[in-house]
Image (cartoon, helix red, strand yellow):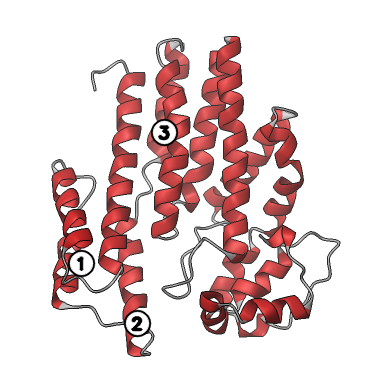
Amino acid sequence: MIGNCSLDNGSVSRRLQKGRLARLALASPVILGVGLALAPQDQAVSYEEWHRATETQHQRVMAFRDVVRETRPHLRQWLQGEKMAEARRTAYLWIDGFRTGRLTDLTPAIYEDGVEEGPKAEIFRVNAELAASLARNAEREAKKGNVEIAADDAVLAYELLQPLKYSDFSAISMTSLRQRRALNILNRLQGTLSLEKREEVVARLEKASQHRPIQKVAALAKHQYNQMVGQDEADPMSSADWKLMQKLEKVSVERPGSRSVIQSIRQEALTNAAIQTDLAADTAMAYSADLDSLEQVRETIFKLKGQPD
């Protein structure tokens, strides 16, 4: 992770030699250049790679520099339940950044530009650990009987995670799992909350869960995969791959009955020997994770409203 690596020019050169990251750096040097900017302020910073970065990618990642620096030093104490008022204030810095458009999701520059490594991974890690500290505190407060504080922290954790969720397929899957913790807390609390608090939580969950552009994520992944094929860096999709992707493009997780369709496509992607790429399987699994997440938040909202599942 960024905070644990040396940031001199030699270490950058060594990282450029490693497998997937090497190709990533050549195609989108912002992956390394901005990583230096997100490093602790007292470390040496080199900007030599920045001139090769696209302006959009550069600006998107750089926008997180201040909020990451504001968050990272305090994560340990927040995870231990200390100074939670400060943790909440910091969470709202992230959320306000997303609401104003200063912070955005981190869509990939190329197909293999994921959120699992480099500065994007650091941004996701810091965001996730701040959300985890809020969820853990919600569990503590619930045990103490402070149910409305617990509900506030749980829904804040959910809101904090949502804006980065649709950066790519991996982000959808990881964020869906992390949000499940917050929703489980709210499900356990729903019978103990006042009507006013339940209505507030419902309004916040409904607003946060409206942002669901998975079709755009899938379309970008397909486009970027085809770019790799054109550069002889990936195998072309077979006719079976194309057919499966066309099926997915017609699916909406919002529509009733989509679960059986998505499950069928996912099973085909994982078992059909004619499927030659990971793209179809990755897309199907992301759709499945997104549907699971949507169904869980809907179930939570129904319970908070006092409606049957």
What residue is shown at x 63% (from left), y 49% (from top)?
A: 126
Can residue 52 be spotted in the picture? Answer: yes
The mark nearer the N terminus, 1 or 3, is: 3
Relative to 91, 228 lies left or right: left
**Relative height, residue 196 to residue 226 (above, below):** above
Residue found 40% across the figure and 26% down from its top: 202
Q: To which residue does mark 1 refer?
A: 245
Query: How dense is the environment of label 3, judged by Cα within 10 Å: few (below 14), some, or many (20 and up)?
Result: many
Which x, y percent locates residue 108? 46, 69
For the residues marked 3 and 2, what is the alpha-carbon distance in whole angstroms?
Answer: 40 Å
User: Residue 160: x percent and y percent?
Assistant: 54, 42
Q: What residue is at 34 percent from the left and 55 percent from the top?
A: 213
| Quadrant of the drawing holding the N terminus | bottom right
129 lies above or below 202:
below
Q: Mark 2 highlights which residue? A: 234
- Determine contact: label 1, label 3, CB under 8 Å: no
Q: Position of residue 163 (x, y in %)?
A: 48, 49
Left or right relative to 54: residue 204: left
Chain-order first, disc 1 or disc 2: 2
**CA gap, disc 1 to disc 2?**
17 Å
Q: Amino acid at mark 3?
A: Leu
Quadrant hosting residue 22: bottom right
- The residue carrying mark 3 is 205
